[in-house]
Image: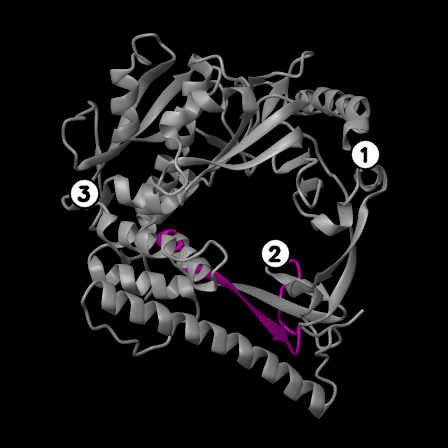
Amino acid sequence: QNSPFDYSTKESVQKGINYCFVDCQIIYKSLELLLKVFNETFNIFYEIKNLPLSISSFSKKIIEMFYPNVFHKVDLKIEKELRDFYYGGRTEVFNFNLLKNAIYYDVNSLYPDILSENNFANCKIQVFDCYKLRLRNKRNLAYRLIISENQKYPLFPTRENKRVYFRKGIKEVIATRTELLYLKENNYFKEKKIIIHRILKCYYAYDIIKFNMLFKETYRIRKSFESKHPFGHILKIFMNGGYGKFGQKATRKKYDFLKTIEGIDLDNDNIYLYDDTYVREKEIFNPFLTHNLFNAILTTSYARFKLWKMIEYCRKNNIDVYYVDTDSIVISNINFHRLEQFTSKIKLGFWYNESNFDYFQAFDSKEYFTFSEKRKKKFIIKYKGVKNELLDSIDKFQAHIKKGTKMNIVGSFFYTMNRKSNFETVHIVEKHKRSYYSKREINIDLTTNPIILNDDYNKIEKKNCWLILNQFRKNKKYFKI
């Protein structure tokens, strides 16, 4: 099955060009509006000499204008040292029981709030060997530590086999000064919930800043528009896109088609064969790229810390948290009044009631069912990797688990490496549920415990799989449309 733009005729080529031109017009108009708003709001005159290719690239240019020293050229030594500590958000299921009368809380613009309220490096980070925590000095933004955690909801993540876990036991982490101060002041060290075994390095910035001048004002402008206004959405992309530019990689992959294989070692890992065509993969380094990987690490660390503090607040107040995802939590509706001090529909960084459901059932990270009699679309499935419209009933989801689901997707590079399959070709693939929840161990009562160092992950996943499928069969009746 092909898209409308197969480029086989002059007419279809022109249609494709027109389609792309409309996309370019949308981006250009968005950038033009953003530039006008920023010039008027901040009483500046800034013009675009080289047109950015995206709103995120424009966001980076604006950040550079306000904070000229925040981006710097890539330092390969620091890049190699820090990249493994760059994690994303936290997505976990804490309770696999069916939750009746659920409330889904979100944070108002999480990353803009994090950038506005916390300290960041406005310079190239300096790394020192360190043997003592000096938390009074704000310029000591973070420390590299060997710690052990022994708490129900661990704070610090680790990566094993390309998967992220929040587990108990000994691990090497980068902990921000903000986190360490909080843990010290709230007796986590004294109660031995977290033990520091060794201090390895200190990450120091001689110039520290908060991005509040830019992002708080941008958030105010965004809130002046109605929620569905297109420019409000553009401003949202602008605010979230800037943070991503901190963590850009300086390397990218390039593929060369080989006209001849004479003198080439075909056993080389960088040579691939596709439909009788040999392709060489190269890694290209961009020496002109500027970024700030350490600020990207700080951003995600501060964000996970904000979520963890809410999880801990709920734990201490006997509020069961069923599910979390980066900037959101799911709890019982009977507890909503107990979070009132943290909630606001309009304040940056506050929590707000995003949705209410009659039933909520999680089955994995980013996989859950909801049902609400009052909503127009009563039954909602969120399932990673599969389009929602393909799983619009519980029976389809059950069939998906057993047999998989056919999907039409635009081919990746290896679908499109030779001209027999152009870049707009849509391929039919079959998606299967490959694995089951393994981030935490599920108990018989469907609550969960953190995984401990050296636990057998495969054994845990098999046990979890049995409990999840049993829960699915038990509660299927609640999700019938």
Could you tell me the amino acid type at mark 1?
Answer: Lys
Residue 269 circle label: 2
Task: Name the residue at 44% across, 56% down.
Answer: 226
Precedes in sequence: disc 3 or disc 1: 3
Task: Name the residue at 70% across, 86% down.
Answer: 12
Residue 205 circle label: 3
Tag 3 secondary structure: loop
- Label 2 close to label 1 by CB (< 8 Å): no
Q: How is the image coloured?
A: one colour
- Label 3 close to label 1 by CB (< 8 Å): no
- Label 2 close to label 3 by CB (< 8 Å): no
Q: What span is colored magenta in the figure?
A: 242-269
Tag 2 secondary structure: loop
Precedes in sequence: disc 2 or disc 3: 3
In the displayed structure, would residue 437 be above or below residue 276?
Answer: above
User: In the figure, residue 201 lies in which quadrant?
Assistant: top left
Query: Circle 1 is placed at which residue position?
Result: 480
**Badge 3: how crowded within 10 Å, few (<14), some, or many (20+)?**
many
Q: Nearer the viewer, mark 3 or mark 1?
A: 1
Magenta span contains residue 266: yes
